[in-house]
Amino acid sequence: MTIEMNSAITPTGLFGHTALTGGKVTPAVARTLLNVAEAEAYMAVPTALTADGTDASSDAGKLLVCNASSVITRTLPSSLGAVGQWIEYLNLSEYPVKISAGTDGINSAGFDAIYVLKGNRVRLIYAAASDPKWICADFGNPAQAYASSGDILSTTSTTLADVTGFSFRLPASEGFWFRFDVPFTSAAATTGIKLGVTLTNSTRIAYNVAAPVAADGVSAFFFGTGASSGDAVTATGVETVSGSPVYLATVEGFGVCTVDGSLLQLQAATEVGSSTITIKQQCRGRCWWHPTV
C-alpha cells in the first residue's frame, strides 16, 4: 500500500520506511516480515521441560520453559546456526535448573555450567566456535520468596517452626548465599523474636541474625550467629514504642548441601511462651548461587 503526499519534500529513512518517491511512501516490507518472523519464533514455546536432556540447534530463538519436580540438567547444543543466535530458559519450578555447555564454556573457558533459580529467565548467546562458545549476562539473579497476602506466621510457641513459603531448593555441592528480611510485631516489649535456618543434608551452613531490642543507640540491636542447621538465635525483647510498631529483623548466611533438592528453610518462634510474635506480609527472602570455577 502507498500513501499519497501533497508535499514535494522527500525525506529518507522516516520511521523505518524507504525514501519518498513521487510523493508516495513505500513501506519497508522486508523489515516488517523479519519482525513478524522473530516474534513467531520467540513465541514458539514447547511443552515444559521436566527432565534432563540435550537441546537442539533448532531451538535457536526460542524460550524453553522448565518446570520440573527435581533438579534437572539441560545441555546446550554444540553450536547454533550462526554466531549471535541464542536460546532462552525460564524456570517455573521450585528446583534449580542446571544449564550445561559440556566443555564448551560459558563466559570463560573452563566455566561450563550455570544454574537458573526459580522464577528466573536467562539468555545464552552463541558467541564463538571455540571455548568459550556461550555468553550469559544474567545468570546471577536470585530466587525470591514473598507472601501474597496476610500475616505469614503468628505464634506463641518458643519452639522454632517453618515460616511457610520462605524456603529454597538447592542443588548438591554448590554454594548459596541467602537473606531473609523479617518484619514482625510483638505482643510486649519484653518479648523478642527467635529465628533460625535449617538446611537438609547440609555440609556447611552459617548465618547471622540481627534484631531490634532497645531504643536507638549502641545497644539497639541484638546480634547472634547460627553455626549449624536449625541453630536458634533469640533476641531479648524489642524497643518500647507507642502505638502498634512493626520491627525488622534480618537473617543472612551461606550454605552447602550434599543432595540435589535439599531444602533451605526459614524458621521462627517467640522468645516468651504465650506472648505472640507475628511475622508480617512484607517479609521477603532471596537466595543466590555462588559459582566456583
Image (cartoon, rainbow, N blue to C red):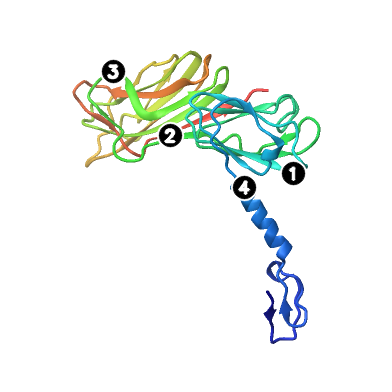
Residue type at numbered disc 4: Tyr
* Mark identifier at residue 84: 1
Residue type at numbered disc 2: Ala
As rendered, which of 83 and 200 lies closer to the eye? Answer: 83
* Mark identifier at residue 42: 4
Quarter that holds the N terminus: bottom right
Query: Which of the 4 image quarters holds residue 276?
Result: top left
Left or right: residue 249 versus residue 88 is: left
Left or right: residue 165 versus residue 123 is: left
Query: Pointers 3 and 1 in contact (CB under 8 A)?
Result: no
Q: Give the Cα distance between marks 4 and 2.
A: 28 Å
Q: Secondary structure at mark 3?
A: loop
* Mark identifier at residue 145: 2
Q: Secondary structure at mark 4?
A: helix
- Please give the name of the residue rendered at 24% of the width and 21% of the height, measured from the top-left corner: 157
Q: Nearer the viewer, mark 4 or mark 2?
A: 4
- Please give the name of the residue rendered at 40% of the width and 27% of the height, measured from the top-left corner: 210
Q: Give the Cα distance between marks 3 and 1.
A: 55 Å
- Please give the name of the residue rendered at 72% of the width and 69% of the height, measured from the top-left corner: 17
Where residue 109 sits in the image (x, y, percent)? Answer: 75, 27
Task: Compare marks 4 and 2 and give the one earlier in the sequence.
Answer: 4
* Mark identifier at residue 159: 3
Q: Give the Cα distance between marks 1 and 2.
A: 34 Å
